[in-house]
Amino acid sequence: MISDLPVGALLGVCAAAALVILLCGLRMTALADRLADRSGLGEAVVGGVLLGAATSLSGTVVSVTAALDGHASLAFSNGIGGIAAQTAFLALADLLHRKANLEHAAAELANVFQGALLLLMLTLPLAAYTLPELSFWSVHPVSALLVVLFAVGSIATQRVREAPMWRPVRTRDTREDVPDEDDPEPRRTAVLVLVFAGLMAAMATAGWALSLGAAELTARFDLNASMVGALMTAVITSLPELVTTLGAIRRGALQLAVGGIIGGNTFDVLFLTFSDVGYRDGSIYHAIGTPDLFWLVVGMMMTAVLILGMLYRQRHGPAGIGVESLLILGIYGGAIATQTL
């Protein structure tokens, strides 16, 4: 059905999907902050697990739909490209927080731990690509290992927050994660959870529509699937992370802002697991090309710089942001230039 639409209508479908994703992501931020306070889990954990997974849902649908249709490169690059885009969004968000470098003010051990977990998970697809092709029911063992790492890492992140073995030095610019004394939301927690779930369903539907539109545009104009995945669908489905990050910073929920990006990136690695299950022609790690691996390496570089920035905790840097933010934007901009010029 979508293949019969003219180009203008296809672009309209993609634009409408992007708007739905954007609006749902904006509403999710306030709900996640309330749920973090009421549950006692804290902004870093809720941002890294609940909000990160929820805002990544539309991207998950894009990757799985592409994999089911046999578009391995689009499925892979959408997930990995989203990691690069979202990390760049965090650097942009640093511009909004003018009091100090965001990584300094949002000091939280749970975010550092989850960043290291993300870097570890990103090495596994690269390892799978270099090893001989191996799959069970067309699923590579690395895909199962990614799920195990994510589950164990999520539990460990909560334990790190509850009983940290070291704590970041508090300065006058550090913003601590303290629950709000006044809860302006009158609805019960169960109702908030249902609203949150409804927003997730809307984002999933938008992601499905976006995937169909992007795949049709790729086929109709013979576009590079890796480029479409990394720079079109990945950026669009990453809009919730941008919106929630900026919204969280404006609310003063700095740990939620950083945790949402890192957690969303960690969940985005699972796109590869879902895509490998959906791709029925063998292991998806052996159906991709060099351009897809390029974005994987870019994501690893940006993540490593972010972790170093969270550990170094520069208070003020050039243009009022941290040096790590400038490096992240430089890496991302250079990657785009390399692939498009």
Image (cartoon, rainbow, N blue to C red):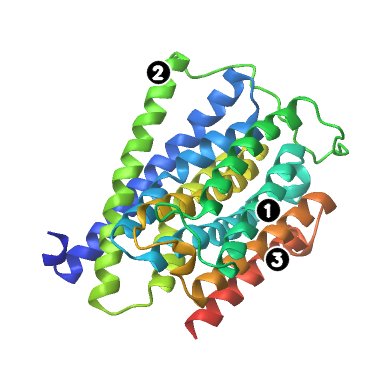
Give x and y (percent) for residue 92. 61, 58
For label 1, the crowd category at 10 Å Cα-Cα, with few meaning under 14, some 14 to 19 and many 20 or more, is: some
Disc nearest the viewer among 3 and 2: 2
Whether residue 134 is situated above or below residue 41 in the rendered picture: below
In the rendered image, is residue 260 in sight? Answer: yes
Residue positioned most to the bottom: 341
Pointers 3 and 2 in contact (CB under 8 A)? no
**Looking at the picture, how far across and down is residue 305, in whole percent?**
73, 61
Q: Earlier in the sequence, mark 1 or mark 3?
A: 1
Between the C-alphas of marks 1 and 2, the distance is 36 Å
Report helix, strand or loop for mark 3: helix
Question: Residue visible at 33% across and 46% down?
Answer: 20
Toward the viewer: 259 or 25?
Answer: 259
Q: Is residue 57 left or right of residue 252?
A: left
Q: Amino acid at mark 1?
A: Leu
Q: Which quadrant would the N terminus be assigned to in this image?
A: bottom left
First-in-chain label (3 vs 2): 2
The residue sitting at 69% across, 48% down in the picture is 115
User: Mark 2 is on which residue type?
Assistant: Val
Judging depth in this view, the residue of 275 and 25 nearest the camera is 275
Q: Nearer the viewer, residue 242 or 184?
A: 242
Q: Residue at x 39, y 65 (%)?
A: 72
Q: Which residue is mark 2?
A: 191
In the rendered structure, which disc, 1 or 2, sits on the residue that comes first in sequence? 1
| Image x and y of residue 259, in percent | 63, 41
Q: Residue at x 82, y 50 (%)?
A: 311
Q: Secondary structure at mark 2?
A: helix
Residue to which mark 1 is pinned: 120
Residue designated by label 3? 326
